[in-house]
Image (tube, grey):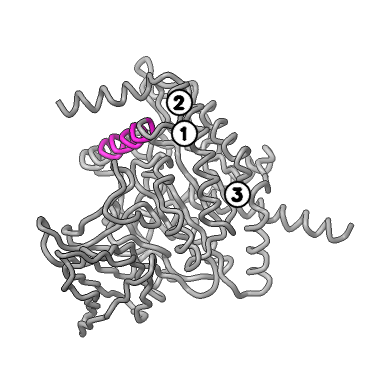
Amino acid sequence: MLVAASGLLLLAIYIIPKDLLNSGTSDEFEQLLNEQMQDSAAFDKITISAADTIPIVTTHTVKENSLKEEKLQQDSLKKLTESKQLSLTGLEKFFKKLQDLEHNKKGKIRIAFFGDSMEDSDMIVMQFRHFLQKKFGGMGVGFVPITSADAKGRYSIKHRFTHNWNKSNFLKKGTGRFHFGLNGTTFYVGDSVWADKATVRFKKGGAYQELPLINPTLFYGKEKKDETNKDTKAEILLVTKDTTKHLQLKPKKLLNSYRLPNFAKEFAITIKDQQSIPFYGVSFASNNGVIVDNLSVRGNSGLPLMKLNYNLMRTFDKYLQYDLLVFAYGTNVFSFKNEKYDWYQRRMIQIVKYMQKCYQNANVLIVSMGDRSTKIDGVMQTPAHLPDFIELQHDIARKSKSGFYNLYDAMGGSNSMVRWVEKDALANKDYTHLNSKGAGIMGKKMFDWLMLNYKQYKKQKKQKGND
C-alpha cells in the first residue's frame, strides 16, 4: 500500500495544473517536499543494489590522471573557449576577493557548495577544493555534519559515527524539533527511544596533504530546557588516543561554537543525553586561503532550502562569512515523462534570492544538471527535452543575477552520458551519477572554467584601469 500511495503521490505532482503549482500554497509546498523524500529513498535503494554507485576513491585515482582523462580536460577547456562560455555576470564580487587574496597572500574566502547525490562522497567538490587551495592557499575540508549518508565513501576525511543520533532533516515533512543546520540537518542525543549517548569520530583522510584536521570547531545551538532534561549538563566528552576530557558548553545563543584543540590524526566527540541541545557539525578550516564546504544532501531538489531559518543562517554567516554559494541541482527534479518546469523555475528564483539575503556578501553560481540517459525505444539516450531544462536553469541564473556553469555542455551535451558510461568508464551504470574518476575530471573542469572566467575578469579590470 505504501508503494502504491507513493506512486499516486508522484503521479499527482506531475499532473497538478500549472495554476495550482504557481499558487504558492503551503499544501503544495509540502507536496513538493514529499517528492524529494521519495527521490531520496529511491536513491538509497540504488546504492544498496549497485556496488559502484559510490566507489571509494584511492590515492592512485585521486592523484594521477590517465592520458585519456587529460585529453578530456584539454578538450573541455578548448570547447569552453571556442563557445565563449565565459560569463562574469553575478561573480564580480567573488572574483575581486579572489584577486585580493592572490595579490596580498592573506585573507580567507569561503564557498558553500549546495547540491544532491551528484556531489556524494565529496568527490566532485574534493577536486574543486583541491585545485583552489593549491592555487590560492587554504587548508581543511570545511564543514562536516555530525552524520551523513555518504560518510563511508568519503576520502577527503574519514568520518564515522554511532547510529543512535537523533536527526531532523529538511527533506522530511514538518519543521523538526530544532532549526535545521547549514545543510538542512540537526542532531541531538537521548530520548525515550534511543540510547543516552552518541559518538562521532573524525580522522584525517588520505586524499590531499592540505586536508588536516585543522582548527576543529564544533557548532551547536541554543538549549531548550524542560522537565525531562532540566538536570542534564551541557557538556561533551573529547576523546583522543590517550585522553578523555569533559568540555563545558554554553548553549545560550541561537548559534554557539567551541574551538577544539588541533589534532594531527583523529579525535572523537561523545555526547551524553543532550536532547535539549541541537548540534550541527564540525568545521575544519585554516585562517587563510580558500575553504569549500560540501553541504550537499541526497534527494534534494533545492526547494527545501526555503525551510532554513533566516536568523540562524545569518548567524552562521557571521562565523563563516561566505563569499560564494554554489547551487547544483536538477537530478531530483527532471523526469523524461515531464516537459513543464515553469513552477520549479519560479520557486528556485525565489529560493536563490532568499539565500542571497541569508548570506548577504556572497555571489551565487548556478550549476546545471549534467547529462543523463533513459531507455527510450530500447536504447539508452538523452531525453529530447533535457536541453530545454538546462536552458531553464540558465534562465534561473539570469533572473537571479547569478553566475552559470553548464555541466551538461561540459560533459559533451546530448548522449554524452552513454559515452561516459560505456566507452570511457567515467560514470555509473544508472546513467546518472559519475564514478570517482568521472567526478575527479568534473571537479577539475569546474575549476578550469572558474579560472577562465577569473582571468577574463582580471583582463577587463586592467583594461578599465588603463582607460
Q: Residues within 10 Å of mark 2 (few under 14, many from 20)?
A: many
The amino acid pointed to by label 1 is Asp
Q: Residue, x 37% and y 45% (percent of image)?
A: 435
Give left or right: position of 292 versus 304.
right
How many tags in the picture?
3
Considering the whole magenta stretch, tell me its main secondary structure.
Answer: helix
User: For residue 177, which quarter of the picture?
Assistant: bottom left
Choose between 382 and 116: the one closer to the eye: 116
Q: Is residue 332 magenta?
A: no
Query: At numbered mark 3, what does the secondary structure look like: helix, strand or loop?
Result: helix
Q: Of label 3 and label 2, which has the lower sequence position?
A: 2
> Which residue is the site of mark 3?
449
Q: Decide which of 232, 201 is in the foreground and name it.
A: 232
How many other residues sit within 10 Å of disc 1, few (<14), some (14-19) or many (≥20)? many
- The residue sitting at 63% across, 74% down in the picture is 105
- Magenta stretch bounds: 28-42
Q: Is residue 358 left or right of residue 373?
A: right
> Of the residues shown, which amino acid type is indicated by label 3?
Trp
Q: Which residue is mark 1?
A: 371
Dot placed on the residue nearer the N-terminal end, 1 or 3: 1
Residue of label 2: 382
User: Badge 3 local density, few (<14 within 10 Å), some, or many (20+)?
Assistant: many
Tags 1 and 2 touching, CB below 8 Å? yes
